[in-house]
């Protein structure tokens, strides 16, 4: 009987890391709500775990026009999209789609603003802009859109684990009853 309990426990340990391996979007560069004052060459999405090849995102201007992204690379938990040309001053939305290593489709979006300083600006205006940037950066610390979905999926993972435990318990009690009959 001890052996059965031990092997049931081993079985549980074997399956549980996978049940908890759900990936979520950890951070992005640029960050959600960030205001950029310099040009960027790429957009990076950092996930909490591995994501599958074929994960991608689209980049849209505030008018809804799609900005071309020349190439995507997936390196373990990092999805990187290369930009063809410098971005004009505007607010952009990144709409991302990826598949977690456990097969979960994941999606969400975040936005950032490009606000490059004009070549001829008085110092006064520059100081004003700096204050604005700090305010928006504080807003950026708010959670990234799409994390709510992750929390739901986490609880569903716990449900799966609970289900596995239940099945194992039923199997053990069935076995014990069968042995007693013998
Ligand atoms: Cu998952």
Image: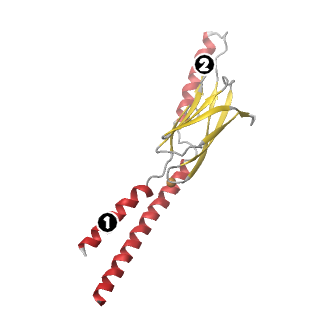
Residue 120 in the image: state x and y as whole percent. 67, 9
Q: Which quadrant of the figure has residue 135?
A: top right
Give the labeled residue for mark 2: 128
Identify the mark at residue 9; answer none if there is no mark: 1
Query: Which residue lies at the image location 33% right of the left edge and 68% below the top edge?
Result: 8
Helix or strand or loop: what does disc 1 sit on? helix
Q: CA distance from mark 2 to mark 1?
A: 62 Å
> Is the CB of mark 1 within 8 Å of ligand 1?
no
| Relative to 141, residue 6 above or below | below
Q: Is residue 60 left or right of residue 140?
A: right
Query: Which residue lies at the image location 40% right of the left edge and 55% below the top edge?
Result: 17
Which residue occupies the extreme bottom position in the image?
181
Query: Which residue lies at the image location 51% right of the left edge and 56% below the top edge?
Result: 153
Please state which of the two labelled residues, at mark 2 or mark 1, is closer to the viewer.
1
Q: Is residue 150 left or right of residue 15?
A: right
Question: Depth check: 137 or 106 in front?
Answer: 106
Q: Indicate the quadrant containing the N terminus: top left, top right, bottom left or bottom right.
A: bottom left
Residue 163 in the image: state x and y as whole percent. 44, 69
> Is the CB of mark 2 within 8 Å of ligand 1?
no
């Amino acid at each position: 009987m001890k052996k059965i309990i031990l092997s049931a426990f081993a079985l549980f340990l074997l399956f549980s890391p996978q049940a908890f391996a759900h990936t979520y979007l950890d951070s992005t560069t640029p960050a959600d709500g960030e205001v950029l004052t310099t040009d960027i060459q790429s957009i990076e999405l950092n996930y909490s775990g591995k994501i599958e090849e074929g994960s991608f995102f689209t980049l849209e201007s505030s008018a809804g026009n799609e900005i071309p992204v020349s190439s995507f690379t997936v390196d373990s938990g990092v999805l990187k999209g290369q930009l063809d040309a410098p971005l004009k001053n505007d607010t952009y939305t990144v709409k991302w789609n990826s598949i977690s290593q456990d097969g979960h489709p994941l999606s969400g979006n975040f936005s950032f603003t490009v606000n490059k300083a004009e070549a001829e600006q008085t110092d006064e205006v520059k100081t004003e802009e700096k204050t604005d940037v700090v305010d928006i950066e504080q807003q950026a610390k708010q959670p990234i859109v799409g994390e709510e979905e992750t929390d739901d999926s986490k609880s569903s993972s716990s449900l799966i684990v609970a289900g596995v435990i239940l099945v194992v318990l039923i199997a053990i009690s069935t076995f014990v009853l069968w042995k007693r009959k013998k």
